[in-house]
């Protein structure tokens, strides 16, 4: 979706969380996970929603023909099961698949009082907790989501659904989904970024630096040439993305985190022939890096 990315989703949601924490108010965030989300979208219910959303009949018929008459079977150790019709799921790897999934879950937040944030099949609920009524309201929203999933034949992976309590004055309330108590978590990966209950970016910085260092080590071992025209494109395309993904959201503020990230680029620029005797700033200028 235009102007909608993992980064904007994270910034928008956690801006409200951090503002509440700065004011000394507790916040509870529920991380929800659909079980095999793209594979379990029922075709008949999907087509019902598409028509209800106002898509013309020709378009709905085209989508129906694209989805139907698919079959599948299982093969284990050379033994084949019988062919079975595929009656659910949007084909992954297609352009239209995620669009159909978004349309299917478009009514997920109707009637929900808490702050809902949805990005594809990643859903989270956030609620400022100041009294017992706030806990009850958040639990009521969880019950509504459970009813929605039951109605539209979607399932939550309850083992991956967690609650994180933010704020020093948090009462650590217990929440349930479909009758099962949600486990408490102090650290979760949200859209590829590690979030902890203190909203610290230390773990994310160390993780990003470690991933980038591993890829850089593979390049160093696997590529014999040290030519700028080879090493620099590899660094920009394979290493830098680990350091830059959604960095506007988790940008480090502590000197030790900044140094750990910068060390990766220091090592990368030293790999290039002719850069050995230059200072780091001179290497950056010569290679047109910031």
Image (spheres, rainbow, N blue to C red):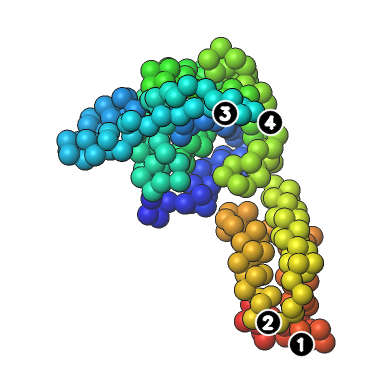
Residue 190: image location, x then y, percent = 59, 42
Judging by the rendered image, the residue that carries numbered circle 1 is: 274
Mark 1 vs mark 4: which is more N-terminal? 4
Q: Which of these two is toward me, 242 or 88? A: 88
At 38% from the left and 48% from the top, the residue drawn is 95
- For the residues marked 4 and 3, what is the alpha-carbon distance in whole angstroms? 38 Å
> How far apart are the two marked residues, 4 and 2, measured between alpha carbons?
45 Å
> Camera-side residue: 27 or 72?
72
Label 4 environment density (alpha carbons within 10 Å; few <14, some 14–19, many ≥20): some
Secondary structure beneath dot 3 equals strand
In this figure, which residue is indicated by the disc labeled 2? 228
Decide which of tag 2 and tag 1 comes sooner along the chain: 2
* Residue 95 visible somewhere in the drawing: yes
Q: How many neighbours does mark 1 have within 10 angstroms: few (below 14), some (14-19), or many (20 or more)?
A: few
Label 1 vs label 4, nearer the camera:
1
On screen, residue 58 above or below 6: above
With respect to residue 107, does 260 lie above or below?
Answer: below
Gap between marks 3 and 1 measured at Cα: 55 Å
Q: Secondary structure at mark 1?
A: loop
Q: Residue at x 39, y 25 (%)?
A: 85
Q: Is residue 161 visible?
A: no
In front: 217, or 203?
Answer: 217
Q: Which residue is mark 4?
A: 185
User: Badge 2: few (under 14), some or many (20 or more) residues near its Cα, within 10 Å?
Assistant: some
Label 4 element class: loop
């Amino acid at each position: 979706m235009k102007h909608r990315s993992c980064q904007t989703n994270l910034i928008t949601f956690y801006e409200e969380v951090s503002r509440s924490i700065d004011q000394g108010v507790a916040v509870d965030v529920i991380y929800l996970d659909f079980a095999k989300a793209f594979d379990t979208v029922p075709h008949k219910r999907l087509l019902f929603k598409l028509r209800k959303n106002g898509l013309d009949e020709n378009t709905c018929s085209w989508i129906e023909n694209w989805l139907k008459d698919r079959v599948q079977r299982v093969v284990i150790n050379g033994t084949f099961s019988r062919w079975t019709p595929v009656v659910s799921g949007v084909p992954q790897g297609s352009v239209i698949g995620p669009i159909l999934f978004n349309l299917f879950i478009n009514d997920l937040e109707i009637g929900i009082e808490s702050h809902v944030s949805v990005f594809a099949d990643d859903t989270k609920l956030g609620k400022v907790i100041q009294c017992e009524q706030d806990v009850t309201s958040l639990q009521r929203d969880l019950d509504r989501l459970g009813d929605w999933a039951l109605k539209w034949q979607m399932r939550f992976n309850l083992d991956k659904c967690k609650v994180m309590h933010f704020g020093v004055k948090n009462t650590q309330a217990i929440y349930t989904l479909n009758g099962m108590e949600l486990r408490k978590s102090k650290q979760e990966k949200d859209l590829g970024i590690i979030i902890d209950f203190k909203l610290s970016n230390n773990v994310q910085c160390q993780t990003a630096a470690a991933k980038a260092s591993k890829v850089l080590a593979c390049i160093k071992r696997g590529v014999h040439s040290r030519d700028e025209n080879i090493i620099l494109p590899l660094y920009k395309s394979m290493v830098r993305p680990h350091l830059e993904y959604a960095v506007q959201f988790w940008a480090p503020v502590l000197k030790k985190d900044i140094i750990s990230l910068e060390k990766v680029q220091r090592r990368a620029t030293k790999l290039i022939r002719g850069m050995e005797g230059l200072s780091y700033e001179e290497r950056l200028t010569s290679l047109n890096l910031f």
